[in-house]
Image (cartoon, helix red, strand yellow):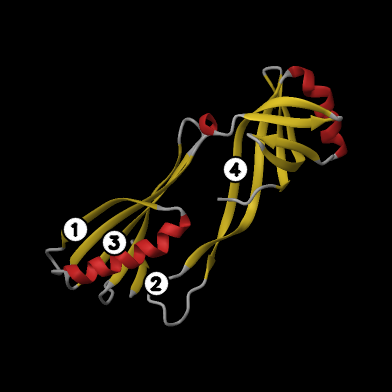
Amino acid sequence: VQMTRAWPQMVVPLPSIALSEADNSQRADGGTVAAVQIDLRAAAPEEADALARQVNQALMPLGLRRTRCQDAFERDSGTCLKRLLYERREEGADTAPGLCVLVLQGQPVEGRVLWWRRQRRLQEHTALADDLPRLSLGPLVRDALRICFGAGALPGLTAAFEAGQQLELTVDGLSLQGLPAALDLLEGRPQLELAVVASPPAP
């Protein structure tokens, strides 16, 4: 199977797969949408269907969801075309975990999580005999969250931030540990960004 980007246009032997980025945008609520369009070309519809099943098996473990599948026919070449669209949506602040309790100078302080971002790299396990790339999600390369507190927490947060003190907290009942990465004051309320150093496994 020949794999190419959708551009530049080129003639490749059948069957073939062409990839193109369909969306990579940020929504108003802070969430993101990533989408990839996959064009499968084959000599017969049954061959394109089989190729689509292999693509689906490769992409589903990456958290990509198929949102469109369409058959077409290219008049100039007589090639069977199957067009797939896969999307992944990351939710924004409005769906972030809600209640946070941070242990600050031995005392629990309540806050509200604005966002929790966990990013992982792709790992490739493709063998020479594989027709399609074999990918999986690798270890976390970023695990951070931002929390908004009441104004009364500012002195303790400032002291912890300046000391680089590792902090303990719970988010919706999950126990975490993190290091202060940023401290901002917005509209009189402190916002603390934590780099998580101990957390539950990523989904």
Dot 4 amino acid type: Arg
What percent of the width, then of the height, locates residue 78?
A: 13, 69
Kindly check if marks 4 and 2 are in contact, taking CB atoms under 8 A apart as contact: no
Label 4: which residue?
A: 117
Q: Secondary structure at mark 1?
A: strand
Identify whether 4 is placed above or below 60.
Answer: below
Q: Measure the alpha-carbon separation of dots 1 and 4.
A: 37 Å
Residue at 19% over, 70% down: 46
Q: Does residue 7 show up?
A: no
Q: Measure the alpha-carbon separation of dots 4 and 2.
A: 30 Å
Label 2: which residue?
A: 132
Q: Secondary structure at mark 2?
A: loop
Label 1: which residue?
A: 71
Going from the N terminus, do you reach mark 2 or mark 1 first? 1
Identify whether 77 is placed above or below 137.
Answer: below
Kindly check if marks 3 and 2 are in contact, taking CB atoms under 8 A apart as contact: no
Kindly check if marks 3 and 4 are in contact, taking CB atoms under 8 A apart as contact: no
Residue at 27% over, 65% down: 40
Dot 1 amino acid type: Asp
At label 4, counting other C-alpha atoms closer than 10 Å, the crowd grade (few under 14, some 14-19, many 20 or more) is some
Judged left or right of residue 110, residue 107 is: right
Q: Depth check: 61 or 8 in front?
A: 61
